[in-house]
Image: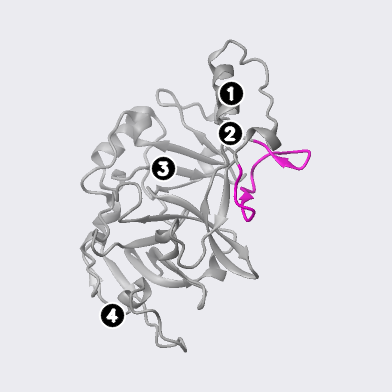
């Protein structure tokens, strides 16, 4: 889904071309983007992989951007200008097509996805949060009965079909949420839009700045508004001149409960997998995410 970015000094609602007043504000989670769709006849987790231009095309594109010809459109030859991608690669759904070819975005990249295979070395942290035999994923979200409580559970991949999610954890983006350790890495999936923001101020620069700096709920990487027309609008702390990561994130201010009863599954899970580790602390409650210690 393409993003629009809020201006940092003045926020013009008309200029956004979307009804942000009726949009749903949610926490922008700091991780790597994933997607769930069908592969080999079953739901699969897919990792983000942008198709990027080769050196010659990238040089030509940069020269164009730095020239005074921005009024003219840059011409891409998709078949010749881009590095090869795996055969299983698919373009993101929202990418514009021309003559059946996906077209690059404003950065000269073609956003897309590749399936995460079991025991993948390149995407080992992605593969650690899914089990294709049982078709489940490790998901972090609010507890259904208590919005003040987070829950880690095994969710059927079929329930996540055609959704995008964020993978967070020990080895992702410097681990801003303090999950796991080098010896015992921990990774989780968060569906996009899962953490709705309840008490957002007016969309004035100073009010947003004060909210990020002084409100407990503002201890997040940014905000993503989900508009009724499908548009996503985001503002990052960096857009307001604020630092990220920060020591005490809002995500780590809530208790979290483990819901990982695996007794209903016919076969045993791999002893080293995260699902098995979480099953050993099923029903346990922790004061915050970073307090979780797996019984390894």
How far separated are the C-alphas under marks 1 and 4? 53 Å
**Point 23% across, 75% down: residue:** 295
Q: Which residue is mark 4?
A: 280
Magenta stretch, residue numbers: 84-103
Tell me residue 110's x, y (percent): 60, 40
SS category of the residue bearing label 3: strand
User: Considering only vertical position in the picture, is 28 above or below 114?
Assistant: above
Q: CA distance from mark 3 to mark 2?
A: 30 Å
In the depicted structure, whether residue 293 falls above or below residue 69: below
Viewer-proximal residue among 182 and 12:
182
Q: Which mark is residue 53?
A: 2
The answer to whether residue 10 is magenta is no
User: Does residue 236 appear left or right of residue 55 in this picture?
Assistant: left
Secondary structure of the residue carrying numbered label 4: loop
Name the residue rendered at 54%, 21% in the picture.
62
Which residue: 36% across, 68% down?
A: 152
Position of residue 234 measured from the top left corner of the image (x, y, whole percent): 46, 38
Can residue 145 be seen at all in this image of the molecule?
no
**Of the numbered discs in the image, which one, if any, rests on residue 223?**
3
Q: Could you tell me what secondary structure mostly forms the magenta stretch?
A: loop
Location of residue 206 by image quarter: top left
Q: Are marks 3 and 2 in contact (CB under 8 Å)?
A: no
Mark 3, residues whose alpha carbon is within 10 Å: few (<14), some, or many (≥20)? many
């Amino acid at each position: 889904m393409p993003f629009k970015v809020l201006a940092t000094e003045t926020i013009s609602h008309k200029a956004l071309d979307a009804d942000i007043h009726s949009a749903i504000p949610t926490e922008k989670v700091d991780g790597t983007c994933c997607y769930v769709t069908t592969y080999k006849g079953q739901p699969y987790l897919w990792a983000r992989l942008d198709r990027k231009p080769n050196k010659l095309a990238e040089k030509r594109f940069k020269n164009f951007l730095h020239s005074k010809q921005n009024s003219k459109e840059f011409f891409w030859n998709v078949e010749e200008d881009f590095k090869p991608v795996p055969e299983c690669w698919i373009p993101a759904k929202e990418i514009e097509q021309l003559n059946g070819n996906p077209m690059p975005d404003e950065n000269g990249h073609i956003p897309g996805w590749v399936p995460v295979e079991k025991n993948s070395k390149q995407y080992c942290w992605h593969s650690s949060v899914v089990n294709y035999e049982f078709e489940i994923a490790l998901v972090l979200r609010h507890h259904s009965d208590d919005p003040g409580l987070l829950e880690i559970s095994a969710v059927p991949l079929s329930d996540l079909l055609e959704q995008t999610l964020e993978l967070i954890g020990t080895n992702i983006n410097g681990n801003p949420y303090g999950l796991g350790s080098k010896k015992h890495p921990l990774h989780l999936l968060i569906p996009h839009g899962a953490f709705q923001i309840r008490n957002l101020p007016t969309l004035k620069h100073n009010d947003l700045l004060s909210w990020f700096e002084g409100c407990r709920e503002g201890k997040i990487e940014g905000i993503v508004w989900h508009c009724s027309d499908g548009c996503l609008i985001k503002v990052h702390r960096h857009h307001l001149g604020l630092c990220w990561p920060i020591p005490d994130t809002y995500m780590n201010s809530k208790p979290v409960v483990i819901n990982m009863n695996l007794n209903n599954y016919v076969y045993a899970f791999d002893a080293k997998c995260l699902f098995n580790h979480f099953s050993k602390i099923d029903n346990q409650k922790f004061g915050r995410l970073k307090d979780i210690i797996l019984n390894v």
